[in-house]
Amino acid sequence: MRTATVHRATAETVIDVAVNLDGTGVYQNATGIGFLDHMLDQLSRHSLIDLSVKVEGDLHIDGHHTTEDSALAIGQAFAKALGDKRGIRRYGEALSPMDEVLTRTALDISGRPWLVWKVPFTNPMLGTLQTEMIEHWFHSFAQEAGITLHVELLHGHNNHHIAESIFKGLARSLRMAVEIDPRKADAIPSTKGML
């Protein structure tokens, strides 16, 4: 079973994360930020990765630490569950239409974290989530998961649709990339012999 749990405790947040890469998209997310929970639910449902995230954060200040630290912990859990990455397809990509919005997501579970971000938001908030924190969430997740990640808005303008489209795109890209390739289930997908 490719599963992992992470407990992360700081003076700003206390977080418990559980992931099952071979799940069915079962989720239970409670960060204290409703819109972030909605996005994590989408991430789980469309990746078929079971995800549980519980956060007690300093929301009396703002949502920064909760958003950032949840991404760090989720990324750590993904990396832990992937282990040596033996047998994975490694690459994933998705075009994600949502009404007038179209986004493109592409990733490589390379062990070399990087984020290319071309997603402008025009509203400062989505519910109680600061839209500037969405890029930060993707950056923090990619950093800890060891993923090269490209995210781009191709067209559209509704901020809710944009956010939901990119989280669904990440989900569908991860689903493709973490899947075990039956033709090479015993091999590390790199000529270096490690990722």
Image: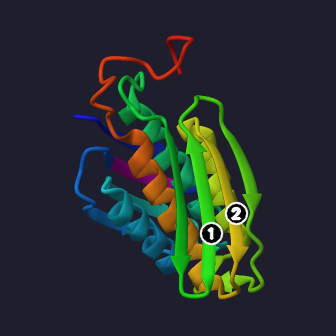
- The span picked out in magenta is 14-18
Residue that numbered label 1 is attached to = 103
Q: Residue at x 53, y 52 (%)?
A: 93
Decide: marks 2, 1 in contact (CB < 8 A)? Answer: yes
- Residue 147 covered by magenta stretch: no
Residue projecting furthest to the front: 183
Name the element at disc 2.
strand
| Whether residue 128 can be seen here | no
Q: Earlier in the sequence, mark 2 or mark 1?
A: 1
Q: Residues within 10 Å of mark 2 (few under 14, many from 20)?
A: some
Quadrant of the rendered structure where residue 108 is?
top right
The relative height of residue 105 versus residue 159 in the rendered view (above or below) is above
Q: Residues within 10 Å of mark 1 (few under 14, many from 20)?
A: many
Q: Position of residue 30 (x, y in %)?
A: 39, 69
Q: Residue at x 70, y 86 (%)?
A: 157
- Residue 16 covered by magenta stretch: yes
The relative height of residue 36 versus residue 83 in the rendered view (above or below) is below
**In terms of depth relative to the viewer, which is nearer, 24 or 172?**
172
Which amino acid type is marked by label 1? Answer: Thr
Name the element at disc 1.
strand
Which amino acid type is marked by label 2? Answer: Glu
Q: Position of residue 138 (x, y in %)?
A: 62, 56
The relative height of residue 90 versus residue 57 in the rendered view (above or below) is above
Residue that numbered label 2 is attached to = 152
Residue 156: assigned label: none
Image quadrant holding the N terminus, namely top left
Separation of disc 2 and disc 1 at Cα? Answer: 6 Å
| Most common SS among magenta residues | strand
**Would you say 2 lies left or right of 153 here?**
left
